[in-house]
Image: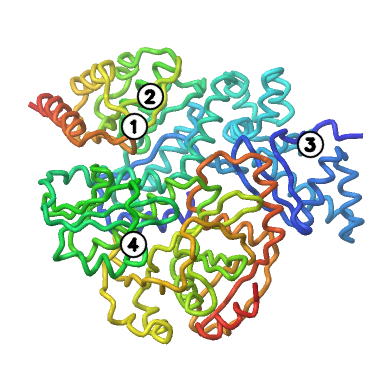
Amino acid sequence: MDVNEMRLLDDVIDVAKPLWLSDHIGFVRTPEANLGHFCPLVPNSENVAIVADHAAELSDRFGVPVILENATSHIQVKGPLADTDFINLICERGNCGLLLDVTNLYINSQNHGFDPIGWLHELDAKIIKQLHVVGYAQVENLYFDTHSEKIDKPLWGLIREVASYASVEAVILERDSNFPPPQELVDELIQLKQLFSRTDN
Amino acid sequence: MSDPFIQLADDIALNLLQNEGVLFSESRQEIYVINTTATFIWLCMEDALPFEAIVAEYADVFDMPGQQAAESVLATLQEWQGMGYLWGVDYPNSKKIGFNTALGRLLTNPVLREAFANNPDEISQQINVNTTDYNAFIALDLAQVEVHSRLLITKKLSRRHAAQRNFEARRFYAYSNYIVSPLDSDAIEQRYQVLSTRFVLRFPPVEYASLIEGAFGHLRTDSSKEVDVQFELVQSNNKILLLENSEPTRDCGSISGVVPMINAALRQSVASRHPHFLNIHAGVVAGKKACMLLPGSSGSGKTTLTAGLSRTDYQYFSDEIALLVKAKELCVQPVPLPMTVKSGSVSVLANYYRDIANLPIHVREDNKEVRYLRPAIDSLPRKADCTMPVAAIVFPQFDAAARNRLDPIVKTRALSMLLEECMDIPELLTKEQISDLVAWIETVDCYELAFSDLEEAISLLQALDF
């Protein structure tokens, strides 16, 4: 891992004192180029080892549990492992949790044509620690993770399914732009809180 | 005969600048400055010379042994291959590459994607993908790769508009404090003009009047013409809120943040209302017929120099912002908002602005204490909405231990440094615009100024004489 980035992360962790340290499952740089955004890995045992060992190294170094996030990708990479097995094995070997981005799951399922609920149930429920949710954008038949829309009905359905499947410890509503009147976000937060409080009970 | 394997991406254009080159990828909106030797190699590639011929020419022109020339040319081509500017460099004797590297090449290179569409298996062999990654690579759906490639470009471009997103986020936070009662009926109303934009600012009289006048009084106008933007300061939810055309746009916690908040809002409003080619983080002063850009990051001394120069024969155009617009050539427009002087520069500028130490201290959003220095009326351009060509670009660097010196710099370096200080590029750049930009900077004198003494630094700049 990049020594300079580790040093920078030292400073961030000193200040933020986070409950978890999270990053995406994927790659951004190759030996030749910085691609600037996440790209998907081949789901195979070699990559399980690389990602899990990196997660364990981070956790040991910073003394903070690591949770890894499922990224959205327009490219579907076919490998010897199913995506869900890939994630389960990484979390098991790396002793880390999953930050389940429900929106990313929904977007990938629509772009690649699979059943998101079936995919969810193939995950080990115990690894799911935190959720990210936000609405998505749709252009013609493609779905995009823009962090700029409200949560719509089909996504609420998937969020409900997650709430009944896993004991989630935290939920983050993401929004980077196209900010609505605050009450709209407050309403979404209240709805999320109700959904996951009910599950706790 | 052209090399059968190496192919250039077709969206890259080379512009020559002095003896060096500026590559521009239109599809990726990427500007990449290359040195003389790399420019030579690119020109050979454009002439479709095969690798061996490039090496021979390179060894001859730069007077080096063949082996060294071959290594140097190969390293350059490989770097460009990684960036997606060409492909096929190391075929047929290439090392094995993994899936990530292979996918990276596809994502960055439209020519390689086209070849992959015709025959993925052949491309996999040519770029020598690992046996273990072969199946995953040839199974890639090219339509999906195209979409992802466009997404990478979009993500990259969106970083150019970080300022706009920051502005949106601020507006959202301001909104969250938006519990506003109507403004007092005895509120003061002042009118200001920057360029052709007329602003009205309404604020409660007692607390803010002298602070606002002290910073923005030089921009006041008596014009009764219709205003373009209306700002109001209101108290709301223990915050001071700035409304722009009745909508919350920024907030601050105390009176010390009011002027910085208005200044930032005015700068944002002017930049968004006046079409421009580039918005550079720079101070600007103008001579009789042309102006001088002083781009630099925080702490470089650009405001101190701008303020000092404005007390000599130069007109004050702007601080922290240079709006470059396209006329016959690239010109600058005046945005004479007050100069933002940090505490460390107060004593240095006392010789030029006697009362500077007595100016009120404000606290910016980054918690820095600043004073807002109004330019002298006689240092302002006569016409608010004018344009002026650029004669010189000076990159200042204050260093208390430095000997004052002004050194010319090569144009490619100046272009790179200028673009580093670019805060906003409103539109997608075209090959023609980059060609114009390169032609423009070729006509402008470019310098680096290291300085520890303001007076001496000003003398050095005055000697430029334009």
Mark 3, Cα crowd under 10 Å, few <14 / some 14-19 / many 20+, is: few
**Which three-letter amino acid code belongs to the residue tagged 2?**
Ala
According to the picture, the residue beneath numbered tag 2 turns out to be A137
Badge 4, how many Cα within 10 Å: few under 14, some, many 20+?
some
Q: Residues within 10 Å of mark 1 (few under 14, many from 20)?
A: some
Q: Is residue B386 left or right of residue B257?
A: right
Q: Amino acid at mark 3?
A: Asn
Q: Disc 3 marks which residue?
A: B93
Inter-mark Cα distance, 4 to 1: 39 Å
Q: Chain of mark 1?
A: A
- Residue that numbered label 1 is attached to: A148
Say if labels 4 and 1 share a chain.
no
Mark 2 and mark 1 residues within 8 Å of each other at the beta carbon? yes
User: Which chain's residue wears label 2?
Assistant: A
Q: CA distance from mark 2 to mark 1?
A: 8 Å
CA gap between label 2 and label 3 equals: 45 Å
